Amino acid sequence: MNIKITLFLALIFICFLGNTQENINSVSLEFDLKKAEYLYHFAYECIDQEYPNKLNQVLGNDSYLAPPRELHPAFYGCFDWHSSVHGHWTLVTILNEFPNFKYKNEIIEKLKKNITKENIRKEIEYFDDKHNKNYERTYGWAWLLKLDEALRELNSTESHNLHKNLEPLVYIISEKFSDFLDKLIYPIRIGEHNNIAFALSFAYDYAVKYDSALAIKIEDKAKEYFSDDCNCPLTWEPGGFDFLSPCLQEATLMQKILTKKEFEKWLKKFLPKFEKNPAKFIKVAVVTDRSDGKLAHLDGLNFSRSWCLFEMGKTLENQKMIDLANEHFNYSYSKMDSGEYAGSHWLASFAIYALKASEIK
């Protein structure tokens, strides 16, 4: 009898733990002031930190050898150009979410110092150079459009002026994006910067509001690239250096351009059985060395998977996807402040994008 009672109590305890864990996983994340105050400093401290720096430039002659602040006076910090751009996006997004943020004035001053007409003119000269006309294609391009989208939404005198200063570069990037899509026959499906589904998804967010011609082209090209895809090998992911999931980025792009009914039908072919048990297909990515910039990519993968799972889970009312999104987010968020610049110069933007995705209604 005692053994039976003990087993019964043990069973109750296990069920209690399971239900408690389920409840914990089911709680949606919140982009609250505490998180904003924690995350802002990563971007605030690096957008004017010039070194270390990775330029990724093509040299035409000796004159191309110059410090980052001269080559890219607007976006010279945060280790590389694209990280500087999404560092600026991080700060603008925080101000959008928290209009009375206590470091608002300091942030605005830094933004005004970097995004000037003269600095943007210099950036345009770089993108017009015959040796660097494809610079930051397409990852940096997509983030620049995201930055302009955030500035337009901030709706203040300062943000309006910053948008007007940035606008000539945005126009050029939009043109470059459109021209490239005309030439790109085959989609780029890797888990790093050149992933075309990621770029199309971010650019579409901007274009559907402010650039109808680009939005239509993105819709057409996404359908051309991905409509017939099926059985995406999600269990092959992640690659060791991935910060994007090729399968999930494609799925969230198609969710944006298809109707809900069309998307549900497409997803069943693209990721069979994923909706029923997403945790069977992907696990949280483990980072073994955060001082290694490539291995630290996997923290970014956890955040980007998180936002994809939130976006799909909310649309499909799929709690299992939402729980898995929480799990991915929490693993890497708890290790954000590792003291390693390899991750700290860029991960705040990914964390904030995931937090915003968690709040989709």
Image: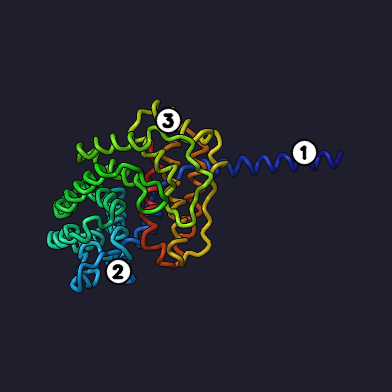
Q: Is residue 291 visible?
A: yes
Which label was assigned to residue 266? Answer: 3
Q: Is residue 127 positioned above or below 325 on the image?
A: below
Horizontal side of residue 148 vs 194, given as left or right: left
20 lies above or below 86: above
Q: Amino acid at mark 3?
A: Trp
Q: Is residue 53 above or below residue 357?
A: below
Judging depth in this view, the residue of 31 and 126 nearest the camera is 126
Residue of label 1: 8
Q: Which residue is mark 2?
A: 49
Q: CA distance from mark 2 to mark 1?
A: 60 Å
The residue located at (84%, 42%) in the rendering is 3
Q: Decide: marks 2, 1 in contact (CB < 8 A)?
A: no
Foreground label between 2 and 1: 2
Q: Secondary structure at mark 3?
A: helix
Q: How many marks?
A: 3
First of labels 2, 1 by sequence position: 1
Between label 1 and label 3, give the one nearer the viewer. Answer: 3
Position of 157 compared to 46: left or right? left
Image spot of residue 286 (x, y percent): 53, 56
